[in-house]
Image (spheres, rainbow, N blue to C red):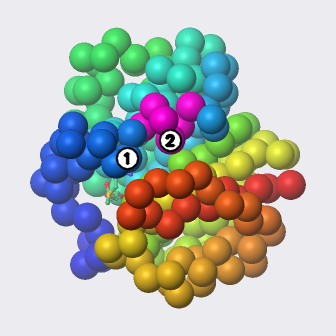
Amino acid sequence: MAERVCPWWMGYFLLTPIRKLFENPRKILSPFVKKGMNVLEPGCGMGFFTLEAARLAGPGGGVYAVDLQQKMISALERRVRRAKLTDVVAARVCPADTLGVSDLDGSIDIALAFCLVHEVPDAGRFFGEVRRALRPGGRCLVIEPVDHVSEEDFEATLETARGVGFSVAAGPYVRRNHTAVLESG
Ligand SMILES: C[S@@+](CC[C@H](N)C(=O)[O-])C[C@H]1O[C@@H](n2cnc3c(N)ncnc32)[C@H](O)[C@@H]1O
């Protein structure tokens, strides 16, 4: 596993309720995720955002949660069962070099890439896969932490996204984070 990948045990810290004070999942997601939508969440971790995305999208919608690490997915699945959201969330493990979501091509309304892109080995490939998964007019909300990602690096990330055909619009304000909305057109 690449050195920059968040270790699995950090997944528990990422679930801390204190995080909601500055990254409130409902507040961040509710303008983007609506009832009946299909949501793709690569790098979901243990699901700090996943459960709220599922409450907003379901019933009738779906959240496809994908992560490199089995331990993240196992913890997410336990939380999904406890929250009685198993009808809405489908979780899967992927290898580092692909999200393995070609079965979803053209079906996703919104993709959520939160605190992830700086960890993927090839951002161009990653954005290409996300773009293929989106339906026409679908969007991808990207959020990257300022503690790990400089302004310059975030700009380079957006340039990579443009390179696979996304247009870039301003994202919502999220304290201590860079944000952008990628539009598939
Ligand atoms: C910093 S954590 C963020 C988790 C979650 N998005 C959140 O904000 O709480 C990054 C997650 O991305 C996953 N990840 C890293 N590289 C990945 C890749 N190439 N494909 C899929 N998931 C990846 C890690 O295993 C980890 O769970």
Q: Earlier in the sequence, mark 1 or mark 2?
A: 1
Q: Main secondary structure of the magenta part?
A: helix
Q: Are marks 1 and 2 in contact (CB under 8 Å)?
A: yes
User: Where's residue 145, x and y in %?
Assistant: 39, 66
**Residue 127 drawn at (x, y percent):** 63, 65
Q: Amino acid at mark 2?
A: Ile
Q: Residue furthest left?
A: 9
Residue 170 seen anywhere in this rendered image of the structure: yes
Note whether ligand 1 is within 8 Å of mark 1: yes
Residue located beneath label 1 in the image: 23
Give the crowd class for mark 2: few <14, some 14-19, many >=20 residues within 10 Å: some
Horizontal side, residue 10 vs residue 55: left or right: left
**Residue 60 in the figure: left or right of residue 64:** right
Residue found at the far bottom of this picture: 152
From what the image shows, is residue 89 above or below residue 109?
above
- Picture coordinates of residue 155 (x, y %)? 60, 80
> Helix, strand or loop at disc 1?
loop
Cα separation between marks 1 and 2: 7 Å
Pick the front one: 8 or 95: 8
- The residue shown at (17%, 56%) is 10
Q: For mark 2, what is the residue? A: 28
> Is 115 left, or right, of 58 in this rendering?
left
**In the displayed structure, would residue 173 be above or below residue 86?**
below
Q: Residue at x 62, y 61 (%)?
A: 180
Label 1 amino acid? Glu
Q: Residues within 10 Å of mark 1 (few under 14, many from 20)?
A: some
Residues drawn in magenta: 25-30
